[in-house]
Image (cartoon, helix red, strand yellow):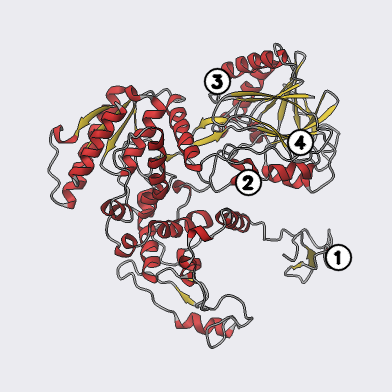
Amino acid sequence: MRIGVAQINTTPGDFAQMASRIVSLSETAASQGVDLLCFPSTVTTGSLVPFEACATEFVLDAVGALAEAAKSVACPCLVPIPTLELLGRIDCCALLSEGQMSVHDAAGQLMWPGDVVESSRDAGGRPGPVVEARSKRVMFVTQHEGLFDFSLGPRDVDVVVFAPALGTAFDEPDSLLGVDLSHTAYPYLASALESWLVVVSPVGGYGTQVFPGGSCVLSPSGSVVDCARSLDEVLLVTDLLEPESPEAPRELAKGDRHAFLWQLLVAGTRDFLHKQGWRHAVLALDGTLSSMVAAAIATDALGPTNVHAIVDAPESVEREAACQRLARNLRIDCRDGSDLAALPPAKEASDLLLRRGIVEAYLASWAAELDGMVLSCADKTSLALGGALHPAAASLAPLGDVLLSDVVALAAQRNTASPVIPDISLPDAEKSRALGRGRFPALAAAPLREVEELVMERYEAGFEPSRSYEEVGFDQELVREATVAMDEAECARLNVPLVLATSQWPVDRVLRPMRMAWHASTAGRGEPLQIDPVRSEYEPDPVADELRRALGLDDEDGSDADGGYGGRRPGRRLRDVAEDDMPADAREALAYLRDFAASGAFDASLPDPDGGLGSDAPADMGNNLTIKDAAGNRWPTPFSAN
């Protein structure tokens, strides 16, 4: 069987363009002898869905356009229809072949158009529909969970086509197809499935998500047979032929993560503006490194004639000169803030805020004149800790999901191609302003990576910083200031513009209730962290101490009664371990475990004891581990003793 993968970038909802591209690509694929051409999950509707009131009409129009395209395709085409979820269908796809279109779900074939009719064929535990092509059974899947679940059961398909529907997230290795395929789960899944695995990745920006491309084909042995270029439109054609003699997995070049991140931000910025009909971007070069990096990203995305900047850095003559040189190096349209009318001198902090507000008004006026969009230069660290000043008129923050330490690395990465950024250093004054605008001395004095660890513990894992970090060596005052700064920034982040998502948890998706007085307890000490908004001091709670001891959670000496790890023990602290001493995958492994626990994977989902296994359930599944429910029933678990 010869399979084709159409790794393309489309405009959501433009069904005429979609149908035209499907027909055109099918003709090219047919000329190369392709038996089945697979399209990505975004080809019909993008990564977003319309309002619920319009859902049915939207789906009907999409499927109608596919039915018209089916009359002209030159080879069989497999096209996902993710928005059928709005009508109660999951993992649906359309097969366009020989002038006809058939729509399939996991239970079989659906009749369309007309009434939706269930097939009598049972799904057999499959996570997606199965179609026939060249006497091969081809299963279509869009959900990671379904792919993993199917790999654990009986397999009855020859080819699995996986079309991921979520964009790139640097804390999710399986989404980084363009960086290093060996760090993903796909080689393992192909061998576990005992079938060919075809990963069909979209490419480009869809709303705030950015897809990497890098589609690939893996053999039943887990070998990488073929792989498409990342962040580029490609028609990948591959013969599904297992070599007669087993071969080692194909070694793929590992892409530099920051070079890949730069390309993602450029593609996401370009598509965000272009797909909404914008061509010009306007921003403020305020002397910060983030503003200079944002200007370079916008220039790479839109071209220098479409980027316009106001240079205004009154706090530093050197940084203002650096911004002027950057504008000349990038050859972008630039205005000097000092030439703007009614702009007061920045003698006091209040003067700086007033001056920035006037610059924002000029940005909004300039954008309206050009029919363009205002960009914010704020980064994730500054947004989380209340150090960001972004224009109220801004619609997009390209760096809003990028940590400040990564902004520094991006500046260095960009200068390896051409040294356009005059100064890639991070001055202490800029760091202090980013970490709470100079109001938190412990934050300003701490290493930037330590502060960002505290930020990401709340954003990625949803934990209070004190809960996981105080007992491993972080300074108590640093933890307190980080917690107060993030709490105070919650309200301001409600006004954050859209950000290009490069993680699973951008700033606009993680919000605590406004100014909640309660905070999680300090781990292992029995001392709830009470932060007074005025005094901001730690107050140990003796009642909680007594309660923990009464429940047998703590011995008198403060250690855990069961000899566990809750008590504070001497030893090597995490902050004392040099970064070079840690395994390269340590952070990814810990992030995976946190996501696994946070998503509920360790929370037993028990069936009704009267209708299922109940108390007669086997004691274990070969691993001697069981879960005991509230009624005293024991249930087997899939986890090993490890």
4 or 3: tag closer to the N-terminus: 3
Q: Quadrant of residue 294?
A: top left
Of tags 2 and 3, the one toward the viewer is 2
Q: Nearer the viewer, residue 88 or 5?
A: 5
Residue lying farthest to the top in this orientation: 72
Q: Nearer the viewer, residue 26 or 32?
A: 32
In this rendering, the label closer to the viewer, 2 or 1: 2
- The CA distance from mark 2 to mark 1 is 36 Å
Number of marks present in the image shown: 4
Q: Which residue is located at x 56 percent, y 53 percent?
A: 584
536 vs 219: above or below: below
Mark 4 residue type: Ser
Give how far apart the Cα atoms at labels 2 and 3 are: 35 Å
Which label's residue is closer to the chain start, 4 or 1? 4
Distance from label 4 to label 1 (Cα)?
37 Å
Q: From the image, tell me which residue sits under label 3.
A: 14
Q: Are the residues flagged by discs 3 and 1 in contact, CB closer than 8 Å?
A: no
Dot 2 and dot 4 residues touching (CB under 8 Å): no
Callout 2 secondary element:
helix
Q: Residues within 10 Å of mark 1 (few under 14, many from 20)?
A: few
Q: Amino acid at mark 3?
A: Asp
Q: Is residue 310 left or right of residue 442?
A: left
What amino acid type is highlighted by mark number 2? His
At label 1, the amino acid type is Pro
Q: Which mark is residue 183?
A: 2
Does residue 68 appear anywhere in the picture? Answer: no
